[in-house]
Amino acid sequence: MQLSETQMKFIRRWGDMGTRWGIPRSTAMLHGLLYVAQSPLTAEEMCELLQLARSNVSTSLKELEGYNLIYRESRAGDRRSFYRAESDVWEMARRILEERRRRETAGAVQAVEECLDAAREAGDEHTAARMEAMQELLQTAENVATAAQRYNTSVFRRAALMGSKVLALIAKI
Amino acid sequence: MQLSETQMKFIRRWGDMGTRWGIPRSTAMLHGLLYVAQSPLTAEEMCELLQLARSNVSTSLKELEGYNLIYRESRAGDRRSFYRAESDVWEMARRILEERRRRETAGAVQAVEECLDAAREAGDEHTAARMEAMQELLQTAENVATAAQRYNTSVFRRAALMGSKVLALIAKI
DNA sequence: GTGTATTTTCTGAAATTTCAGAAATTTGTC
DNA sequence: GACAAATTTCTGAAATTTCAGAAAATACAC
């Protein structure tokens, strides 16, 4: 496989994007590569195409698997693993949402919960009130994110596409 | 002003949270401090309470102002600035959303747009299709985020609280 | 089992980010 | 204007993160 100039451009941009989102550049680039690739690739090929160290590719692919953004496949008579990306962008978004919920929001809910308990324990009304408000926000975010996992990708996509209309409707109630 | 143990605990936790979200620990801690503070604080007081360098506090406060998460106020006969945080957590969330949209999503939409043009130019059907799908996702996220800015905080909150029910409804269509 | 292809883990170097202290600038008073 | 208080910017040190190369572990053929 050879990368076209256009593909390389996307991969580089996607890498830049990643860094703004807290994802290492090389990890994001590998994801971008698999997203535009027409067929599954081996780790070795990816090293070659993006000029990354084999170790780096190995670690990054594992991270991407953790986010369920890529699949690894085996082929008969070939002991290497072949990787391909989830190609449905809505499914991709849903999985990112789920992982971020798990790693970030869930922890926050628990942390604030603890602080709320401590504030009540100490009879600190003001702080308790603040913690309660924060708790409502975090718990709601958590609930929405969890709900999004219950339905299929098509529902998720339609909900997003209708998003602004739903808001307009709610504003009228 | 003196910080209670509970408040200090929250501030530290909030700082930890920040780092996971790509926000410097000291910046997040300052925000947490202002969120739990009962009255506006000066930069100097914040240095004292959190044991941070004056310069650091200055930079971080400016960053928080950039996110519209804090307000600075002046008082007659006092040349110092007094800071307080937005205390409505839903308004807070809305502003974070808006800033993230501006800084992260907006740039991505443009980057993918460019790549899409390049792919079409080069007659690269496969890549163009992938870029189109990605574009739909990013543009939709952008649209929803923009829409959320059009209504007041109460609408935003109600929409979030109804989120899972709205999803269930859409799933039935 | 042995040997080889492939992947993963370990280690440290390079790059980046965070943040304190010093210097410079701004703001407001007189 | 001169002066003092407050804030911001500059600089580099410390901490963290990213990532390459080497070593170790694993998987599979024979």
Image (spheres, coloured by chain):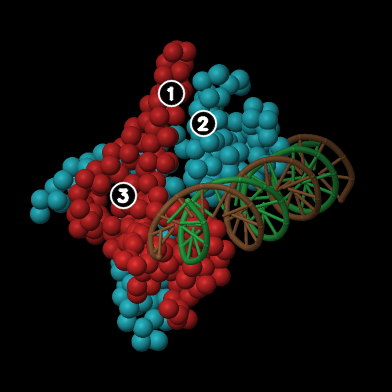
Chain colours: A red, B cyan, C green, D brown
**Residue lying at 41% horizontally and 64% vertically, measured from the top left:** A80
Say left or right for D6 vs B41: right
Secondary structure at numbered mark 1: helix
**Percent from the top left, x then y, of residue B105?**
42, 60
Q: Which label's residue is closer to the chain start, 2 or 3?
A: 2
Instruction: Name the amino acid, label 2.
Output: Arg
**Percent from the top left, x then y, of residue B42?**
63, 33
Question: Quadrant of the rendered structure where residue A135 is?
Answer: top left
Instruction: Name the amino acid, label 3.
Output: Tyr
Chain designation of label 2:
B
- Does the image show residue B98? no
Q: Residue furthest left?
A: B173
Chain designation of label 3:
B
**Percent from the top left, x then y, of residue A163?**
25, 54
Neighbor class of circle 1 (other Cα within 10 Å; few <14, some 14-19, many 20+) is some
**Residue lying at 32% horizontally and 39% vertically, measured from the top left:** A142
- Which numbered tag is attached to residue B151? 3
Mark 2 touching mark 1, by CB under 8 A? yes
Q: Name the residue under label 2.
A: B13
Q: Mark 1 points at which residue?
A: A114
